Amino acid sequence: MKATLKPMRLLAAGMAILTQIVVHPVHAQDYPTKPIRILTTEAGGQSDVVARLIAQGITGPLGQQILIDNRGVLAAEVAVKSPNDGYTLLLNGPFIWLAPLMRKTTTYEPLRDLSPIMLAVTAANYVVVRNTLPVKNIRELIALAKSEPGKLNYATAASGGSPHLAGELFKIMAGVDITRVPYKGIPQGYNDLLAGRIDVMFPTAGSATPHVKSGKIKALAITSAHPSPLFPGVPTVTETGLPGYESGTMTGVFAPGGTPTAIIRRLNQEMVNVMKQPQVKDKFNASGLEVVANSPEEFTALLKSDMARMGKVIKEAGIESD
């Protein structure tokens, strides 16, 4: 009897191991079987626009409805508490992975509780100044700021947002003292810049472009590492006086941490295919967004680099967020 049981036990153990090995691939092959939800920021914002364009593109290939769930600042909190089965996704910008560096207590750790799928798009910031400010480039702006420490000011909206971080990075790298003036929203900052009460802003390029084209404010540079075809003729900060400077906004897609790799791969493949279609790229470009559409591994590496780089800025500038 014992001799008979031993082979049976070995067979059962082998079947158990085999079941563990094949369960995820089978699950991924069946995926998706129901609608997928994408959590993102407020309706009408940059992340919302990106989410809707991606959703439109992947609905057909995945064969399921893609629902946009606008949760604002709570989007990440909801995502990390959701099942890691591929039916809840998160699309958002740097605040998602930088917020834990700006808060005393957080409920999640980005690289542990979120699974990166793809960096969708990037958006440069402009360095813009009031028309009456006597500078023509970044070099002259730095010289003016150094000659009058604390006299120049710059406008931002949310603490820890892209315009705020771009401004603080500029101050640190240039070694200048420029006073931050916080507003409830960027439109209020523009109003005072146009009226000459604010000297400098570091807004997203998309929001600044209409004011720049109208000639109501001066664009000194964009904050991307390289010149952008979306803003022809506008030099980078690096080219015009501050080598090595780079800032901007990244918008990426995540799943809850622990989502099966095969599902992450499937989602990445379908999203990349959509993002690289010429007509889709044109829609993003029209909003001042440059398509990246990279791999989960490349996105993860960028997240680690950004958290390390901007973490130093956040600490040195003493930036805190609610």
Image: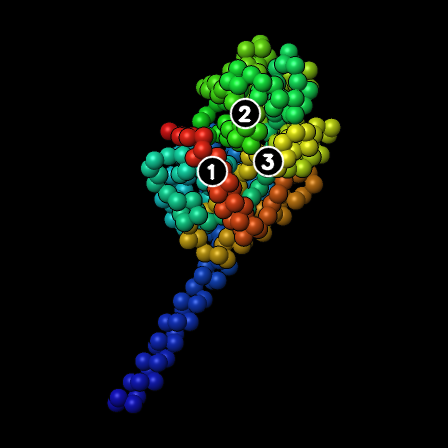
Q: Residue furthest left?
A: 1
**Colour scheme employed for the rendering of this structure:** rainbow
- Residue at 26 percent across and 88 percent down: it is 2
* 243 in relation to 132, above or below: below
Q: Residues within 10 Å of mark 2 (few under 14, many from 20)?
A: many
Total labels: the figure holds: 3
How far apart marks 2 and 1 lie (CA) works out to: 17 Å
Where is mark 3, residue-wise?
A: 246
- Of label 3 and label 1, which has the lower sequence position? 3
Asked if labels 1 and 2 touch by Cβ distance under 8 angstroms, the answer is: no
Above or below for 233 versus 310: above
Give the Cα distance between marks 2 and 3. 17 Å
Q: Is residue 221 above or below residue 69?
A: above
Residue under circle 2? 176
Element type at marker 1? Answer: helix
Q: Mark 2 or mark 3, which has the lower sequence index? A: 2
Q: Position of residue 124 (x, y in %)?
A: 61, 32
Q: Observer-nearest residue: 280 or 76?
A: 76
Residue 263 image offset from top left, x and y in percent:
49, 54
Question: For the view shown, which residue lies furthest in the front direction?
Answer: 147
Residues at marks 3 and 1 touching, judged by CB atoms closer than 8 Å? no
Does label 2 or label 1 sit earlier along the sequence? 2
Q: Quadrant of the N terminus?
A: bottom left
Q: Is residue 57 left or right of residue 113?
A: right
Three-letter code, disc 3: Glu
